[in-house]
Amino acid sequence: MSAAPIEDGDAVIEEPGQELPDAPESARKVFGSNFDQAVRYAELLADAGVKRGLIGPREVPRLWERHILNCAVLGELLPAGASLCDVGSGAGLPGIPVALARPDVQITLLEPLLRRTTFLEEAVRELGLENVTVLRGRAEEMIGKLSVDVVTARAVAPLDRLAGWGLPLLRPYGEMLALKGDLAEQELADHKAALVKLGAREWSVGTAGEGVVETPTHVVRVQVGESPGGVKAAARRAKAARADRSAGGNRTGARRRR
């Protein structure tokens, strides 16, 4: 059975129907009281996510293990009450599964494309996620405007480029958790010099989800020092701070003139 044609801008996409499997028992353990919302999120991905080109139709049968749970287990690496930014969030992976698994964590889904942020906003409303904010924009535009404890991303870019986007958004001594595949060790070895230039002081490759998912998630962990993102990011933060102070002064002056 084929799905009806879906309009996406000027294009019309024909997608074959795929059946979403039932949630595995491990999902109940990972999501706890938010299990029903996790099921609803899986349904949104399998329906609107496919129709809007955010998820490939062939991924639907493996949404739980390969995508939702694979991302949700990242929550076990987060400190209590942390703030997190999911850079290039796309369909909400890993940010939304983490938000469901760790409702104590405040999460920003950062995504530059309108059709994706529209989906994210709809999903956040549908799931009632009070700990999630959707923000449209590019990471480099948010330096000096957004500052978090943890940055994460999944399948966005090579590690050096991802670090260039994500590390400047961290608070001093924050951490980037990049979800990577089996070549995580090699990618880290290839990009250590870039990480140092961007203010990293420690890095390692670990896993999340041991005993929960069939294939544990490989995570590149990068901790920064006092200057997240390096010299250029520090200059951009200083410039943004000066602009804020100037704007505040102008507003004060306008009030006094009245």
Image: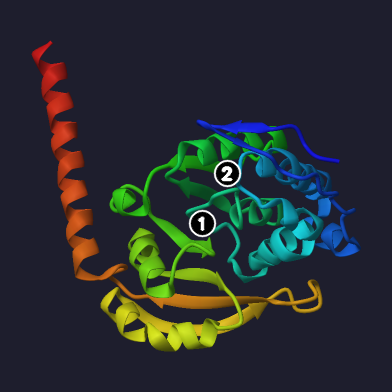
Please tell me which residue is depicted at 71% across the width and 43% down the height of the picture. 15
Check if mark 1's residue and mark 2's residue have beta carbons within 8 Å. no
Q: Of helix, strand and loop, which one carries label 2?
A: strand
Residue 189, quarter of picture: bottom left
Quadrant of the frame with the N terminus: top right
Which residue is identified by label 2?
Answer: 132
Which residue: 68% across, 40% down? 14
Q: Earlier in the sequence, mark 1 or mark 2?
A: 1
Judging depth in this view, the residue of 46 and 80 nearest the camera is 46
The amino acid on which the numbered mark 2 sits, given as a three-letter code, is: Val
Q: Is residue 255 visible?
A: yes
> Residue 61: which disc?
none
Q: Position of residue 154 (x, y in %)?
A: 55, 63
Q: Quadrant of the C terminus?
A: top left
Residue 76 in the image: x percent, y percent? 67, 69
Left or right of 194? Residue 219 is: right
Residue 167, by quadrant, is bottom left
- Left or right side of 98 for 148: left
Amino acid at pointer 1: Leu
Residue 80 vs residue 126: left or right? left
Image coordinates for residue 54, horizontal then vertical, percent: 60, 47
Q: Position of residue 193 (x, y in %)?
A: 31, 85
Q: Secondary structure at mark 1?
A: strand
Sort mark 2 into few (<14), some (14-19) or many (20+) by Cα contacts within 10 Å: many
Q: Is residue 146 above or below residue 47?
A: below
Q: Nearer the viewer, residue 17 or 135?
A: 17
Farthest residue, direction top: 258
The answer to whether one can see residue 173 in this image is no
Residue that badge 1 annotates: 84
Q: Residue at x 11, y 23 (%)?
A: 253
**Mark 1 residue crowding within 10 angstroms, few (<14) / some (14–19) / many (20+):** many
